[in-house]
């Protein structure tokens, strides 16, 4: 049935157009193609060229930025390394300063300790001399009183009492020195 309709409509192959249709269709295509080629194609090519140029500039800018970033990374790594070296130097100087401060403090403490020991020894010697003088005067007074009791009279002559006391103390000191062992005298 389909074949009968095709044959009835004019004969031939339905896929092949008639000659006037083919000519007018080709002519219309050529006119449209020329119009597109004349008017639309240049702006299309310009847009493509512009986009290509922008892409190339973007790639160049990205490459420059990549190089700058790499240079900055190297610079930052150098700065970090320099900062580490400076920190190590600062720590070393701080340790040296701490050692010198400790040494100075120890020397100062030793000096102050020696000063305190000297002053304590001087105070002890002064106190011993004062105690010795006081003891001598007390012993002298007691010896004078004892001598007065033994004699039965009060010794009123102070010069005589002083000589008696001095002689008594000298004899006492000599007897104490004679009783000490020889090793303590040599020491």
Image (cartoon, helix red, strand yellow):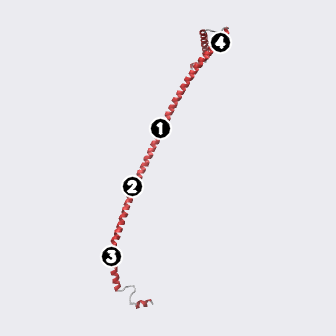
Q: For the residues labelled 1 and 2, say whether their Cβ atoms are less than 8 Å apart.
A: no
Residue at the spot of label 4: 145
* Labels 1 and 2: the sequence-earlier one: 2
Distance between the alpha carbons at the discs numbered 3 and 4: 157 Å
* Labels 1 and 4: the sequence-earlier one: 1
Q: Nearer the viewer, residue 121 or 71?
A: 121
Residue at disc 2, secondary structure = helix
> What count of labels does the image hold?
4
> Quick one: label 3, few (<14), some, or many (20+) residues within 10 Å?
few
* Labels 3 and 4: the sequence-earlier one: 3
* Labels 2 and 3: the sequence-earlier one: 3
* Labels 4 and 2: the sequence-earlier one: 2
Q: Nearer the viewer, mark 1 or mark 4?
A: 4
Q: Nearer the viewer, mark 2 or mark 3?
A: 3
Residue at the spot of label 3: 35
Residue at the spot of label 2: 68
Distance between the alpha carbons at the discs numbered 1 and 4: 70 Å
Q: Report the residue that reaches farthest toward the front.
A: 156
Q: Nearer the viewer, mark 3 or mark 1?
A: 3
Residue 97, labelled with which disc?
1
């Amino acid at each position: 049935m389909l074949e009968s309709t095709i044959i009835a409509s004019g004969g031939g192959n339905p896929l092949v157009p008639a000659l006037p249709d083919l000519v007018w269709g080709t002519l219309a295509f050529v006119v449209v193609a020329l119009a597109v080629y004349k008017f639309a194609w240049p702006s299309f090519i310009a847009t493509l060229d512009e986009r290509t140029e922008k892409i190339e500039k973007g790639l160049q800018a990205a490459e420059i930025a990549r190089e700058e970033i790499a240079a900055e990374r190297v610079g930052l790594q150098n700065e970090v390394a320099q900062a580490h070296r400076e920190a190590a130097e600062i720590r070393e100087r701080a340790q040296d300063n701490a050692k010198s401060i400790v040494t100075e403090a120890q020397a100062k403490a030793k000096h102050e300790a020696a000063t305190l020991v000297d002053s304590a020894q001087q105070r002890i010697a002064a106190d011993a001399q004062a105690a010795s003088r006081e003891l001598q005067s007390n012993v002298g007074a007691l010896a004078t009183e004892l001598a007065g009791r033994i004699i039965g009279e009060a010794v009123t002559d102070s010069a005589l009492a002083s000589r008696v006391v001095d002689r008594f103390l000298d004899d006492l000191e000599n007897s104490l020195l004679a009783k000490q062992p020889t090793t303590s005298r040599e020491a």
